[in-house]
Image (spheres, rainbow, N blue to C red):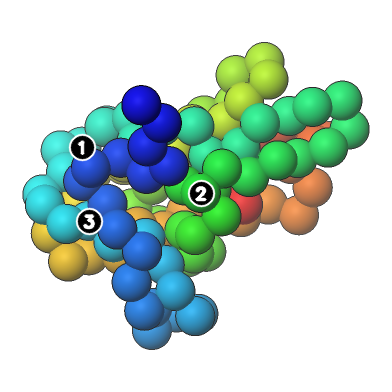
Amino acid sequence: MYKPLPNNVAIQPSEIEGVGLFAVEDIPAHSNLGISHHFLDDKLIRTPLGGFYNHSDDPNCYTVINNDYAELITLHEVSAGEELTATYCINPLSTRSSVG
C-alpha cells in the first residue's frame, strides 16, 4: 500500500513558510525518512516528502543523492513537534549534492 509520507512525520502549519513537515514522534539521528525527489532526464520530481520540508540555514536534515533519486536523512535526533528542514541548493540537477 502506497504511503505518501512516513508514519513519523505530518504536514502542519509552519512558522518558516506556509506548511512544513513535522516529527510526530522522536526520530533518531541518521534516520532515512525516504525519497524526497526523483530525477527523470532533466526534470526534478518532488515526492510529498520533498514537497513539504522547508529550507533552513541551520537544518536538522540533509539530502543524499543517489543516481535517480534523493533521500532525506536526519542530521541528529529530531524531537516530536520539531519541524524538519534542510538546506536548499539553487540547481540540484547540475550539482546533485543537495536538493530543495
Count of marks, rendered view: 3
The residue positioned farthest toward the front in the image shown? 1
Q: Position of residue 86 (x, y in %)?
A: 47, 53
- Disc number placed over residue 48 in the picture, else none: 2
Q: Which residue is mark 3?
A: 23
The residue positioned farthest toward the top in the image shown? 67
Residue at 36% in and 26% down: 1
The residue positioned farthest toward the bottom in the image shown? 15
Q: Which residue is mark 1?
A: 29
Whole-Å distance between the Cαs marked 3 and 2? 15 Å
- Quick check: 55 left or right of 9? right
Residue at 36% in and 64% down: 11
Pointer 1: residues within 10 angstroms few (<14), some, or many (20+)? some
Q: Nearer the viewer, mark 3 or mark 1?
A: 3
Whole-Å distance between the Cαs marked 2 and 1? 21 Å
Residue at 33% in and 71% down: 12
Q: Nearer the viewer, mark 2 or mark 1?
A: 2
Question: At numbered mark 2, what does the secondary structure look like: helix, strand or loop?
Answer: helix
Q: Mark 3: which amino acid?
A: Ala
Q: Earlier in the sequence, mark 2 or mark 1?
A: 1
Q: Mark 2: which amino acid?
A: Pro
The residue positioned farthest toward the right in the image shown? 42
Q: Earlier in the sequence, mark 3 or mark 1?
A: 3
Q: Position of residue 59 (x, y in %)?
A: 40, 57
